[in-house]
Each structure stands twice: as C-alpha cells, then as structure tokens.
Image (cartoon, rainbow, N blue to C red):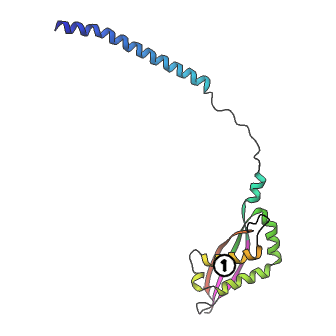
Amino acid sequence: MAEEQQNQDEQAPKSKKTLMIVAGLMVLEAALVYAIVGVLGSGPAPAAASELEGTEQVDREAPMELLLVEDRFQNLDSGRVWGWQAEVYLKIRKRNEPEVSKILESHKAGLREGIALIFRRARDRHLREPGMDTLRHQINAYVQEIFGTDADELPIVDDVIIAKLKGTPEDL
C-alpha cells in the first residue's frame, strides 16, 4: 500500500506539469489565432458606388397596364337581360406603349364593339366563372388579332386583365 501511495505522489507532479504545458499551448494558440485574424480579417473592402449598366433596357422591358375598355355590356344568355360592368386592361411592355396607345386611340370604337360582341355572345356560366378564364382568353385572342406582334416577333399584348366584372339584372 505504501508503494501505491508513493506512485500516486510521483504521478501528481507529472500530471500538473502536463496540464500546465497544455494550458500554455492553448493560450499561445488563442493569441496566435487572434493576431492572424486581426491582420488578415480587417473587414470587407468598402464598396464603391457605380452606375448599373442596362437599366434603360430593363425599364423598356418593364410591364405596364393600359386601360382597354371600361363600360357596361349586356348579355341575354340566361333568358334575362343582364348588364355587366367591366373594366379591362392590357398588360404590355413599356417599349410597346407608344404603338399600343396609338392603336387604342385610332381603333377606339372598333375595340369597344369587339369587346361588346364577346360579352353578348358569352355564356352565362362563362361570365360567372370565379377566375374569368374563358372570358379573359376570348378577349386575349381578340386583342392579339388586333395588336399582333412586335419587331422581335413577341406578342405586343402580354395578357389581358379583367379588373372589374360586376353583373346586375336589368329587366326588372
């Protein structure tokens, strides 16, 4: 038993020495990492303001909406006279705006008549669709025929937006 006590007494200074060496190495490592990060990691370089190139092109391709028609149209499909208050917009690219505005101005009555015919011929169930898909597709096909394509062979009118469609009976 005395030999075991003596072995433990001899190992105690060795383990303290090892512990001191490991602690010293850890402190040295931390100081070294701190110094390296301080020298190399001085933060991001300041950003210089610059002009974005191609913003004119992006602006020309930006979508915009133009009013096609805002009117009241009649439909007799259900056996009753219904008046449908509608507001329809064209979704176009900004670069096509002068051409579209010119066509809208020069064909105002013809466009209104074409849209009125679509509403008169529409089935009652198409006018009451929650997404107005059938009516929107019919109007879109009509305006594609009128406006055609641009120089890049892309349709001038990207889409038709029916912003308002409200029906009321008119035969009371």
Looking at the rendered structure, the number of numbered marks drawn on it comes to 1
Of residues 57 and 124, which is closer to you in this image?
A: 57
**Residue underneath mark 1:** 138
Residue 102 in picture, x, y percent from top left = 83, 72
Q: Residue at x 77, y 50 (%)?
A: 54
Vertical relation: 33 (above or below) 71: above
Of the pair 167 and 13, the residue shown nearer to us: 13
The residue at 69%/76% (across/down) is: 141
Write down the quadrant of residue 56 in the picture: bottom right
| Residue 83 painted magenta | yes
Q: Is residue 69 visible?
A: no
Q: Residue at x 45, y 16 (%)?
A: 25
Residue 33 left/right relative to 145? left
| Residue found at x 61% / y 85% | 168
Residue 41, percent across and down? 60, 27
Magenta-drawn segment: 67-87
Q: Residues within 10 Å of mark 1 (few under 14, many from 20)?
A: some
